[in-house]
Image (cartoon, rainbow, N blue to C red):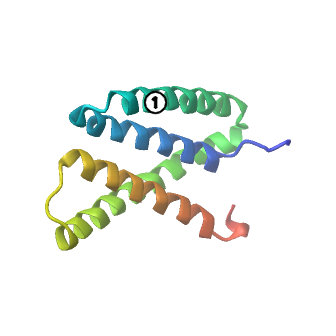
Amino acid sequence: MNATPTAERLSIMLGLLLLMLSTIPRYLAGGHDNRLTMITLALLAVAAVAAVHWRMLEASERHRLPMLLKRFGASLLAGLGLMGAWHTLMTDWISWQLFIAHATTAGLLLHVLWLWWRPVAAR
């Protein structure tokens, strides 16, 4: 398994880290100590893998990362709008902790889909 590290993979790992961070207030508010412990351990593991991945990236891939992070930021904003509209139209108001977790999840999914649907020639 000689997979070459790519900027896309790192941007997804950073998105996953942000997603896990966004769930922490939800677990704190709900008193879910076991889940908080598990998400913290997973956060540390993904952070370690992301750090190793960063060190393995070639210079050309590192230069592509800021553009991918801008796309991820746009995806997060779109996820925030999408989940805001969804919860406004379809549900009663939920806690801000759950809303942020849902919006971050939607943003990460949009980011991954954006990367997946991109033409191969553009990579």
100 shown above or below 39: below
- The residue drawn where x is 78% and y is 43% is 4
Q: Residues within 10 Å of mark 1 (few under 14, many from 20)?
A: few
Residue, x 54% and y 29% (percent of image)?
47
Q: Residue furthest left?
A: 93
Q: Which residue is mark 1?
A: 38
Residue 85 position, x and y percent, is 23, 69
Q: Is residue 76 left or right of residue 122?
A: left
**Which residue is painted at 49% across and 48% down in the image?**
69
Number of numbered labels in the structure image: 1
Q: Quadrant of the N terminus?
A: top right
Residue 122 in the image, given as x and y percentages of width and height: 67, 66
Q: Looking at the image, is 115 positioned above or below residue 9?
A: below
- Please determine whether, in this image, residue 79 is positioned above or below residue 22: below
The residue type indicated by label 1 comes to: Met
Instruction: Tell me: 24 left or right of 30.
Output: right
- Residue 18 placement (x, y as % from top left): 42, 40
Examine the image and state in which quarter residue 32 appears: top left
Q: Which one is nearer the viewer's eye here, 67 or 41? A: 41
